[in-house]
Amino acid sequence: MDFMVFQYPMITVQACLDGLLLGILFALIAYGMALQWGVMNIINIAQGDLVILGGYIAYFMYLYGIHPAWGVIVSPIIMYFIGVGIYKLVINKVVDRDLFISILATFGISILFMQLMNFAFGADVVLANSGYGTTMLFDNNVTLPNSKIFSAVISIVFAIGLVIYMKKSKLGRAIRATAQNSRAAKILGVDTEKVYAATFGINAALCGVAGALISITFTIHPYMGLPYTIRSFMIVIVAGLGNLPGVAMSGMGLGVFEEFADYILGTEFRIGAVFLLLVLILVYRRFKLSRKREYLK
Amino acid sequence: MKIKRIILSFISAVVILFSTSVVSFAKVVGDKIVLGAAISLTGKYSSNGVHTQNGYNMAVDRINSMGGVKVGGKTYKFEIIYYDDESNPKRAAQLAERLISQDGVEFMLGPYSSGLTKAIAPVTEKYGVPMVEANGASRSLFTKGYKYLFAVLAPANLYLDVAIDLAVEKNNGKPVTVAMAFEQDAFSQDVRLGVLDAIKRTGSKKVIDDKLPKELNDMAATLVKVKQMKPDVLVVSGHTKGALTAIRQIAEMKVDVPMLAMTHCDAAKLSKQHGKNSQYALCASQWHKTLTYKDNFFKDGMKYAADFEKEFGYDPPYQSAESSAALLVFKDAFERANSFDQKKVRDALAATNMQTFYGNIKFAEGGQNVDKPMVLFQVMCDGSGKCENKVVAPTKWASAKLIHPIPKWSER
């Protein structure tokens, strides 16, 4: 245990800002997960691997001399079609089944993607350099890489864009209707099959954006997907389905929590702390639910 | 009817098994010495696995074309059977079993990484198969009393202690403060032990001792602490991802530290990925092409690098060089043993005392090479942004002068 983070106010500020910027990015990934979970009742274990795949798209653009920031436009487009493809191949066969089946299926997709990426892109750790420089605050005591700020801004833009799209567009309304009651939606003429495919595609596209941003701010590697899946799962669990402001808040909360866990417990327990929090929240939720049930009795 | 079919298929399976084992390789077939190796051709170590394989192949071709191995007045050629261990220790151990008990291999070359070597060593030890390995540096490999394991590389605890000595030397012999960030794997933790020894020896002080997770891609917290504590040296070891992440975030967060020492910069191709941001980083390396060791097969490091580049199209990392050296050691041992008896070859290996282009090789009791120091190189860039790795320590091999302390980011 190391409480240095509280001894120096500047470190506290740094940790909070780092955590918020990171959390916004997590929230974007979690939003995709919440969307398809809500609409299709599928927990996508391959979420993190889709993120990494999106990152590789940006990385390859960078390799060919295109600025990786363009990845946030190109990567979601490609990823959308990959998402629809996965839906047509696998997900549509498990979408009405038990939740457990879908977890198994997406777990399989996750393993497949990891191996394919490793096979196609190699096992090297890679990154794309944005050359965005650094913002210095408080007399150079707090440093914020502009790439992190960039990724937070882009995440917010995409999140807001998606909310508006869901509210205003025909497909968005169909998606929301399907989420509320797929049978009723079907009766009223919504092509739920199409809605499902689009939802999975949109989720993959969001992962693509996030992946491109991660390749700019951090590093990517074929086997690095799982922590992103866990984080988004955790964020969605905390926020609850269909609660978009909740996803944003819990995303940022998780980001800050992680940063502080990193300082206090050590970097090695960073992901461990997320797991621990997840367990605690699940236990708490169960506890709350059981109390509610008693009350109903 | 069904039982008949089962019996029939069982018999045919047995027949197939026997027929394959008849044609399977023995240790020495005709004029060939068959060596076995499990290599990570897929999975997370695949890039370094390929470097290892290229190193082995390069040496096999070279030795074969220059007359092969002379044993008992007859000339033999090397041949290697490779299997892909998928970067998985369990698989590596299985493959070692298969190489020895099915393919009849009696001499083995090592896999890539300490973890996989650790998985294979008990198997080769059980069968008494001499193994010369070139890519497992973890100290724990050499403390288990293995008799048939020989490593041409320097053990992991020697990787970065040179850096601490160097920092103390630059501080006019006075102790320094050290910040450490090490991944939690066997190799990096061994490097850490070596650094701790050096800290103790020089009376220095560790101010940060962070452990990095396997899925590391953010070490901002450690770097913020470094900014606050202002240590004299920052030591990072976390394989390729550790090196890449450290350089990226040090540059982004403008962390000023007089000395930055790392492992795995060679494989991370720091300057290629990060350009001038990687400048001044010190990297521990088993080998560098500018070292002036010599042998009859590859002449020296520069020649080796040129030949390697011609054949494989890239500058050889030290993983390839040390793998090539393993073959030279085997050849030397076979000729001195003048026999293919495993025990005799093992004793000949233990008595090895030679120089190769990769360095001097002499094995200690535990099997580690004690005659080859690690080198430290520093990434140095010229005005046009072209960066090169130059050896700066130990002084005997230095091709450039260490730039110390690292200029502040505000002055770059």
Image (spheres, rainbow, N blue to C red):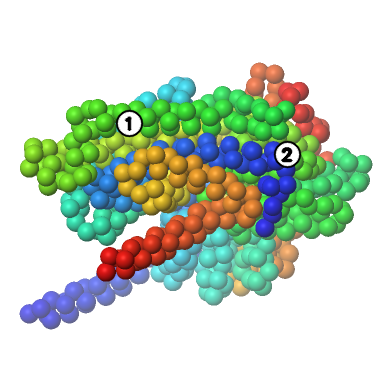
The x, y position of residue B412, in whole percent, is 73, 23
Disc count in the image?
Answer: 2
Residue placed most toward the observer, B80 or B284: B284
Q: Residue furthest top?
A: B384
Marks 1 & 2, CB-CB < 8 Å contact: no
Quick check: A250 above or below B370? above
The x, y position of residue B107, in whole percent, is 54, 64
The x, y position of residue B293, in whole percent, is 73, 44
Whether residue B264 is visible here, answered yes or no, is yes
Whether residue B270 is visible here, answered yes or no, is no
Q: Quadrant of the N terminus of chain A?
A: bottom right
Q: Residues within 10 Å of mark 1 (few under 14, many from 20)?
A: some
The residue at the point 79 percent across, 36 percent down is: B258
Q: Which residue is mark 1?
A: A162
Residue placed most toward the observer, A48 or B364: A48
Amino acid marked by disc 1? Leu
Residue B65 shown left or right of residue B232 in the figure: left
